[in-house]
Amino acid sequence: VLYSLLMLSSISSMAQHQSKMMVELDPASHTLRIQQEITFINQTNDTLSSLVLNDWNTAYSNKNTPLANRFSDEFSRAFHLANEEDRGYTAIKSIVDTNSKNIHWERPNNKVDLVKIQLNTPILPCSKQSITLQYIVKISNAKFTKYGFDSDGNISLKHCFLNPSRYENKQFIQQSNENLDDIPNAFSDFEIEIEIAANYFISSNLTETKSEIIDSKKHHFLKDSNKNEVTLYLQPKNSFVSYKNEIIEVSCGLNDHKVNDIEKAVI
C-alpha cells in the first residue's frame, strides 16, 4: 500500500503527459519536419498495451474523410474541388521506443485522422513510457477553416501535431475532425524548438523562453504546461500586438480594419 501511495504521489507530481518537439518549417512547400518525443504518464488503474494519437491534420487529405463529408453537408464545394497542393496530411516516417525498436501503428477503424500505436511494452498503472516519432506535416490551405497557409505567406497552425487522445471509461476517445474545434486531446506539458526563416515572426499560445539565430535561421524555444493544444502563427509581417496592464498581458492579432488601436486594446 505504501509503495502504491508513493508511486501515485510521484505520478501526480508530474501532472500531465510530456511532449518535446523539434520543428523545421519549409514555407515554400508548406511543410513541417518534426521530431517528437511523447512521454505518456499512465494515471489510470489499467495496463495500457496501445495508445491513440489525434492526427487531425490528415482529415484534409482526401474527399472521403469525415471532415470532407462535413464540408459537403454545409454545401461548401471548395474542399472537394481543391487541388493536391491545397490539401493537408501527415506522413509518419517512424515511431520507436526507448530502445530504438520500431513500434507498429495503424489508422484504427478506417479513421484516417487517428493513429493507434501498439506498444512493444505495456505501460503499467502509475508508470510512464516515452516514444519518439518522426513525421512530416503538409499544411492545408487556410481557405477551408482559416487555419493553414494563405497567399500572403502567413501560416496559422492548429491541430497539426500528434497528441495523445483522452482516456475515459477504460478506452481512448476515437473522434474524427469535423471542424467543430472539439479535439479530445489529453493535457500535456510542451517544449518546442521551432526553426523558421529569419524574416518570419512567431506568435503562440505557449510561452517563448528564448530565441536565437543559427546558420541564418531563427530558432524559437517555446514552453508551457497543462495545454491540450498548440496554436502557432508564423508571419512574414507581425500582426500581433501585446497589451498589458497591472493584471494581465494579452497578445492580439485582430485584423479587422474597422477597429482602431484603442478599440483593439479595449477588446
Image (tube, helix red, strand yellow):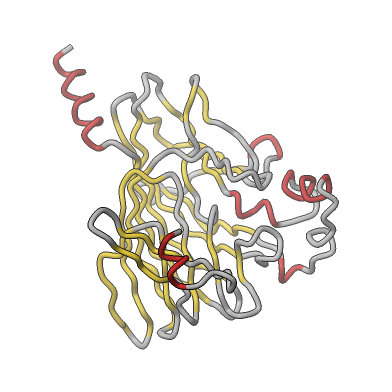
The answer to whether residue 245 is above or below residue 235 is: above
Residue at left 29%, top 55%?
248
Nearest the viewer among 201 and 258 is 258
Nearest the viewer among 19 and 133 is 19
Question: Percent x, y for residue 237?
Answer: 48, 81
Q: Is residue 168 left or right of residue 150?
A: left
Question: Percent x, y for residue 66?
Answer: 74, 43
The answer to whether residue 201 is above or below residue 120 is: below
Residue 127 image-quadrant placement:
top left
Q: Is residue 265 left or right of residue 67?
A: left
The number of numbered badges drawn on the structure is 0
Residue at left 68%, top 34%?
109
The residue most toward the top is 1
The residue most toward the bottom is 216
Residue at left 78%, top 59%?
79
Q: Quadrant of the N terminus?
A: top left
Residue 122 image-quadrant placement:
top left
